[in-house]
Amino acid sequence: MGQTPTPVVRSLLIVCIAVFALQLWLYPAVEQHFALWTPGVGPGSSLFRPWQLVTSAFLHAGWIHLAVNCMVLYSFGPPLEKLLGSARFCAYFLVCAIGGALLQVLAQSWGLTSAGYSLGASAGTSGLLLAFALAYPRHKVVIFPIPVPLAAWVCVSVFAAASLVFALTGIAPGIGHFAHLGGMIGGFVLTLFWRTQQVRR
């Protein structure tokens, strides 16, 4: 689904890449101030600040982490931005990012996943996958490691189910499975709200 990035998608890509460059240059100061730390849990609990619910979405743990999120944003973001409009698309991405951050913090606070700081745009991009599946459920997509094209709703359903299983069982540690789920939940709730507003009009 290669295409020309739309304005918000382009801006998000630039910010993620620029922030990652700052991480490499100013490590570990950037993570200490802008990654998501869980208040009251773990040795870095005192480092939590409210703005980290947003800023952590633009930090990444490595080149592969950055590349995967940028690829999802580049592939699925433009058609959604054209569908929603730039303002709503930006709001949607941020709501998904914050929703993922909140669920990740809650999961760590409740001892459902290991404590430590979290970072990455995965909650936002997970929300984009959900939005794409809702808007274009029968569109064929390929998501690694599934080697064949599947309907978008099937791919996202498998991804959501896998995230839930991994989150609850502790399989594949070191990945923000709760953040993925929180991003999709946040996006779904916002989508329902928008649809409710349209019905009232």
Image (spheres, rainbow, N blue to C red):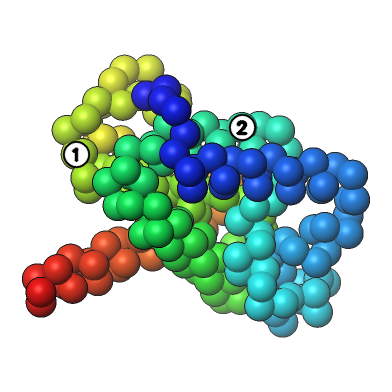
User: As drawn, is 36 to the left or to the right of 54?
Assistant: right
Secondary structure of the residue carrying numbered label 1: loop
Residue at point 24%, 25% (across, down): 140
Q: Position of residue 102 (x, y in %)?
A: 53, 71
For disc 1, the neighbor class at 10 Å (few under 14, some 14 to 19, many from 20) is: some
Figure check: 80 above or below 115 = above
Q: Quadrant of residue 156?
A: top left
Determine whether 185 is above or below 196 in the image. above
Residue 49: x, y in percent?
A: 72, 77
Instruction: State the image coordinates of residue 74 (x, y, percent, origin top left).
Output: 48, 34
- Nearer-N-terminus badge (2/1): 2
**Residue at 55% over, 65% down:** 101
In the drawing, what numbered circle is on residue 116?
none
**Residue 137, numbered label:** 1
Amino acid type indicated by mark 2: Ala
Q: Quadrant of the N terminus?
A: top left
Q: Tell me the number on the disc at residue 67.
A: 2
**For the residue carrying disc 2, how many other residues have a C-alpha within 10 Å: few (<14), some (14-19), or many (20+)?**
some
Measure the C-alpha gap from mark 2 to mark 1.
25 Å
Quarter of the image for residue 11 reads top right
Residue 190 can be seen, yes or no: yes
Q: Does residue 170 appear in the picture of this structure?
A: no
Left or right relative to 75: residue 58: right
Q: Is residue 151 above or below residue 81?
A: above
Q: Residue at x 26, y 62 (%)?
A: 191
Which one is nearer the viewer's eye here, 5 or 170?
5
- Picture coordinates of residue 167 (x, y %)? 49, 55
The three-letter code of the residue at mark 1 reads Pro
Instruction: Tell whether label 1 touches label 2 (CB within 8 Å).
Output: no
Q: Which quadrant would the C terminus be assigned to in this image?
A: bottom left
